[in-house]
Amino acid sequence: MSHMPSSPAQSSPAQSSPAQSRRDKDARRAGEFPPAPEPLRVPVFDSHTHLDLTIQEAGIPGGGAGDPVAVLLDAATKAGIDRVVQVGVDVQSSRWGAELAAGNDAVLATVAIHPNEAPRLSDLDEALREIEALAALPRVRGVGETGLDTFRTGDDGRAAQEASFRAHVAIAKRYGKALVIHDRDAHAEVLRVLDEEGAPESVVMHCFSGDAAFAAECVRRGFHLSFAGTVTFASAGDLREAAALVPAGQIMVETDAPYLTPMPFRGRPNASYLIPLTVRRLAEVRGQDVDDLCAAISATGERVFGGWRAPIP
């Protein structure tokens, strides 16, 4: 790696991060990461992680010294996770991710205003202009996470949220980047907007949360479904049914770190090195060899996001 942006532990965190509204930050106790699982034999990538939020809210595995990003990426590599997609949720995190990706060939970035952040901004148009400028960068390969969230955003914020979503769709299409969707309790509304706007060539349904019927609708449209640690939860039978029907070329795996830690460590901080727990459960649900699933996911990632290992200017 040729250079790395300042660690979020060393710079000021976002003041109104949507992640803080999703989870009480104080509940995350630094150093309480789960033990590393058995490494994967065939490498795979993490399609959706927040390295900055992981460092801010949970620290690093073992609580040791060293550059936090380097520690997290090294732990991931040892587990067989050799590439990650760093996802932006506001202008600050998007800038940070773009700079990180520019100097690290294991990282690609996506940039966006999170759906729950959009209604809070005093100047959404200016924030979107900054996101569009970042989307043009060569190591920024996606626009997201964007979408709709009717769980966290009430009626008074819905118009701004949808306007932001539509603007992100346009940016993704303008620059030929993958669109990374956040969809919480808004399945029909998300499909409505994508159908009305015309979806980009590549759409990733981040942390897919629907049932088999919704999965079939997404698959029919050519979308890619990315499954997080939630697929391992005991209550997630509908989600496992959905995972079982997704074609091999349309499935991905993610952490959404530091959230959604897979079983048996639910509630503890998540990080990319825990992907093996999720991908092995996916393989079991699908009746698929783990190595074959990892190879298929990696091939899909290269097709959707482009190659990670291109020379860095």
Image (spheres, grey):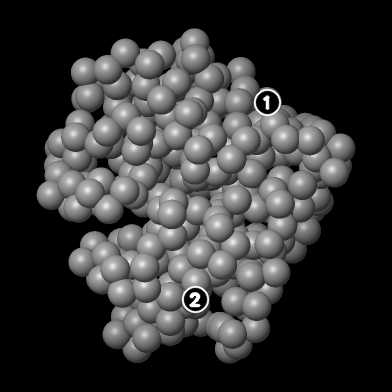
Is residue 211 positioned above or below 283 on the image? below
Is residue 83 positioned above or below 212 on the image? above
Residue at left offset 37%, top offset 86%:
159
Q: Secondary structure at mark 2?
A: helix
Residue at left offset 37%, top offset 73%:
197
Left or right? Give the position of 59 relative to 19.
Answer: right
Give the x, y percent position of residue 166. 43, 75
Give the x, y percent position of residue 220. 22, 49
Q: Nearer the viewer, residue 279 or 28?
A: 279
Query: How far separated are the C-alphas under marks 2 and 1?
Result: 36 Å
Q: Which mark is residue 251?
A: none
Residue at left offset 70%, top offset 31%:
309
Left or right? Give the position of 81 relative to 165.
Answer: right
Amino acid type, residue under disc 2 in the picture: Ala
Amino acid type, residue under disc 1 in the picture: Asp
Is residue 141 positioned above or below 65 on the image? below
Instruction: Mark yes or no: residue 77 visible.
Output: yes
Is residue 140 positioned above or below 171 on the image? above
Q: Nearer the viewer, residue 200 or 77?
A: 200
Q: Secondary structure at mark 1?
A: helix
Q: Which residue is mark 1?
A: 74
Mark nearer the N terminus (2 vs 1): 1
Give the x, y percent position of residue 77. 62, 23
- Crowd class of label 1 (few under 14; some 14 to 19; many from 20; radius 10 Å): some
Residue at left offset 44%, top offset 38%:
254
Q: Nearer the viewer, residue 5 or 311?
A: 311
Q: Which mark is residue 167?
A: 2
Give the x, y percent position of residue 272. 53, 33
